[in-house]
Amino acid sequence: MRMPSLIVAIGLFLGFAAVPGQAYQLDGTSWREGQATFHYDLRYKGSAISPSGKSWNSAFRDAANAWNDQTAFRFVLDTSDPSHPCAGVGDFPQDGFRNGAAFHDKVCNQVDGTEDDFGSRVLAVTIGYSFSSKPDEKVEADMFFNDAESWDIYDGALQGRLDFRRIALHELGHALGLAHEKSKPAIMQPTVGAIYTLQPDDVAGAEALYGPATPADEPIRMAIEEPFNGDVKSGISTFRGWVVSKNPLASLTLYRDGVLFGQLDHNGKRPDVANRFPTYPGSRNSGFAFATNFGDFSAGAHQYRLVARDNQGNQLEKTVSFSISRYENAFVKDDSLVSLRNARISSPAGNDIRIDGLEHDGKEYRVILRWKKAKQGFDPVEIIRTR
Ligand SMILES: [Zn+2]
């Protein structure tokens, strides 16, 4: 019989030591917004599909949605623009606090830039980051699944291969701020075993951090998926999300920096939302999206607020804060005013291109371009005037 293997969480607090915490255990940190966006596109030994035929991405999504559906915490998921959990190594927080998840043969420590082997029988690691000035506020979490193990996706008792979904469920518990629980049945037990779903103790732990879960019969549910909190935008991109309601919606109103922007249509195809919320009428066609030119925004911090109202007087609102990175002159007519002649081009991490000394209309900038899978191209994620 296989001996239980360890699942280890490393709580790395910048400038502080981790303090492990009877029933559910908290790791001492939580997310201020009660949500975290994970950027991932999982491949195990080159394959997106597990031996059982399910994709790693769908198992990760199911694990995240289990937390989303049973607790007040929200994992927002993005598979279009994955962030390797090692991105920004040695350059923290240069990757913009992007939470990543991947199969990997090493654990990357973004604080000192080193890569360490998984310890003996360590299946997965989630590293959380906080600033020493705010040690209880988690700002980034990165998740590593040990490439050297053999993985699959299934329910029930442990088989020869590890079940990825239950281990993702456990690691996501670390990501939202839970530590190991030894005294009660919990997915947060330190060793992997027959438990493959969230247990009451796990849900109680999340409730201690983020309050009670949204009731299943909540009249309106809604998510803004892009931009997400903390996103950095420039150029043309999309505003998108979904809304479902038990009663007919009377309005879906968007405000931009506090100013009325307009009413949004919400009838885009969203089979994934229908799968999660089958009891909400119209959940299959619940998406909203429009193209937006973030170049029209001034550089710095901005906010979208979206308010949904139904015909019974129920109301739900969501707010996302993001920032704009842009050149001071949004439109340069003369191509000769843009030059790379004194520029230095490097690749600090993963699929980033860094340009130092880009001349643009008489000013000098540092620009970071990042590969965007959804666009199949490089997009600016940072444009900072340096001179
Ligand atoms: Zn653990």
Image (cartoon, grey):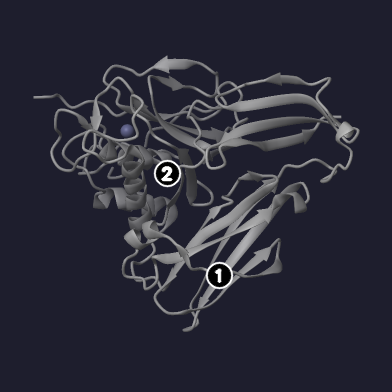
The disc at residue 176 is: 2
49 and 223: which is toward the camera: 49
Beta carbon of the mark 1 residue lies under 8 A of ligand 1: no
Q: Give the left or right position of residue 35, taking residue 278 as reference.
A: right
**163, 317: nearer the viewer:** 163
Q: Secondary structure at mark 2?
A: helix
The Cα atoms of the two marked residues, 1 and 2, are separated by 33 Å
Q: Is residue 269 above or below residue 173?
A: below
The picture places residue 34, in percent across and down from the top left corner, at 48, 52
Q: Which mark is residue 265?
A: 1
Q: On the picture, is 271 further left or further right than 129?
A: left
Kindly identify the amino acid type of the residue bearing the numbered disc 1: Asp
Amino acid type for the residue under numbered disc 2: Leu
For label 2, being within 8 Å of ligand 1 is answered: no
Give the total number of marks visible in the rendering: 2
The first of marks 1 and 2 along the sequence is 2
Q: Nearer the viewer, mark 1 or mark 2?
A: 1
> What's the residue at 31%, 43% (across, down)?
59
Q: Residue furthest bottom?
A: 312
Choose top left, top right, bottom left or bottom right for residue 3.
top left
Left or right for 306, reference 151: right
Residue 132: percent from left, percent from top: 58, 32
Q: Is residue 188 visible?
A: no
Quadrant location, ligand no. 1: top left
In which quadrant is the N terminus drawn?
top left
Q: Residue at x 32, y 46 (%)?
A: 63
Q: Secondary structure at mark 1?
A: loop
Percent of width and height locating residue 77: 45, 47
On residue 292, the disc is none
Query: Is residue 322 in view?
Result: yes
